[in-house]
Image (tube, helix red, strand yellow):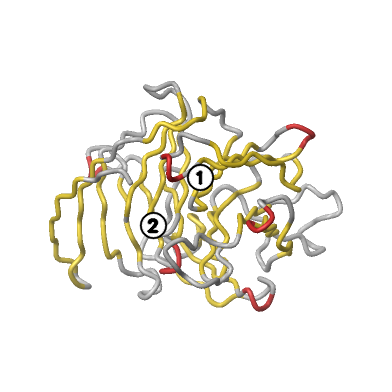
Amino acid sequence: MTKILKFLVLSLFFNGIALSETVKVTPWITSLQLTPTNWEFVDVGDLAAIKRNGKNNKTEIQLLNCFTKFSTTSLQTETPLPATDESWQFTPYDGGGVVGDFYWGDGIAAINTNSKDIKCTADNGCTTELHVLNKNTQYTTYKFQTKTALHPTNSSWSFATENGYLLAITRTGAMGTEVHKLNKKSGYRDFVYHTATTLGQTDSDWEFGVLGRSGDIAAIKKHSDENSGLLEIKIITQASFYKNIARTIKTDISISDHYWKFTFGQNRIMAIHTNNTPSGNTEVYVIDV
């Protein structure tokens, strides 16, 4: 893993003691050349590089090997998904398997936020859909597909899974940034709860994900005023129903252009610089949290 220098500072908040850290991160230079904006990335232990419009009008996956710091490719495959556009989001799928050092979920969740089916309208049951690519078949088949209880969503929503649950995070809820948790046992057709977070409404300068089985949310501020315009991460705890920021992590990463993607895994976050990099390849900053 990338060696991270940490300088720990304790600060008092009204709800207890929060930990603030400053970290310096060295990028890993991947085997991928510069990637255009139609690529997405998912942390599955290895790094899944997802090409939205591959050959044969299909979505394709390349797996970059974690043990070589993503400098080699261990798999290249065509998925059953058709070519996907920006209305699709991708995230690790944690179906509730036994947690261990090498458990990174059961597949990749592909979320269709806004179906373009001409028969689908707000009045006849149009929903956000969940399509899970099966890790055991190297993502060449579906584990399952289902319509969820969510109405059609858009880019102001982020999605994550934790122990079988689907978490849908909206930046522009009536009560601010909100979390809507859906239950696997109902096929994601019932909600467990709806809750406002400690954050007010947020804009596109924020990215959201979940840190593995903890269910804690990592909220990334790409240009933080509190961190000289550099990337900052706030860890918001599930145990507090997302009302408590337990940690703030300030980084030395400068988001100087729009060629960045983010993925969230087991106790780590990857910030991927896809273009305009010093090395001429796609670079990955691994931030241990």
Q: What residue is drawn where x is 70% and y is 59%?
A: 129
Look at the picture and state if 82 lies above or below 132: above
Q: Residue 153: image x %, image y %?
A: 63, 55
Q: Secondary structure at mark 2?
A: strand
Q: Is residue 49 left or right of residue 111?
A: left
Earlier residue among tags 2 and 1: 1
Quadrant hosting residue 4: top left
Q: Is residue 165 left or right of residue 60?
A: left
Q: Residue 147: image x %, image y %?
A: 73, 64
Q: Residue furthest right?
A: 119
Q: Residues within 10 Å of mark 2 (few under 14, many from 20)?
A: many
Q: What residue is drawn where x is 51% and y is 58%?
A: 170
Q: Residues within 10 Å of mark 1 (few under 14, many from 20)?
A: many
Residue nearest the observer in this picture, 186 or 98: 98
Which residue is disc 1 drawn over?
Answer: 47
Mark sitting on residue 218: 2
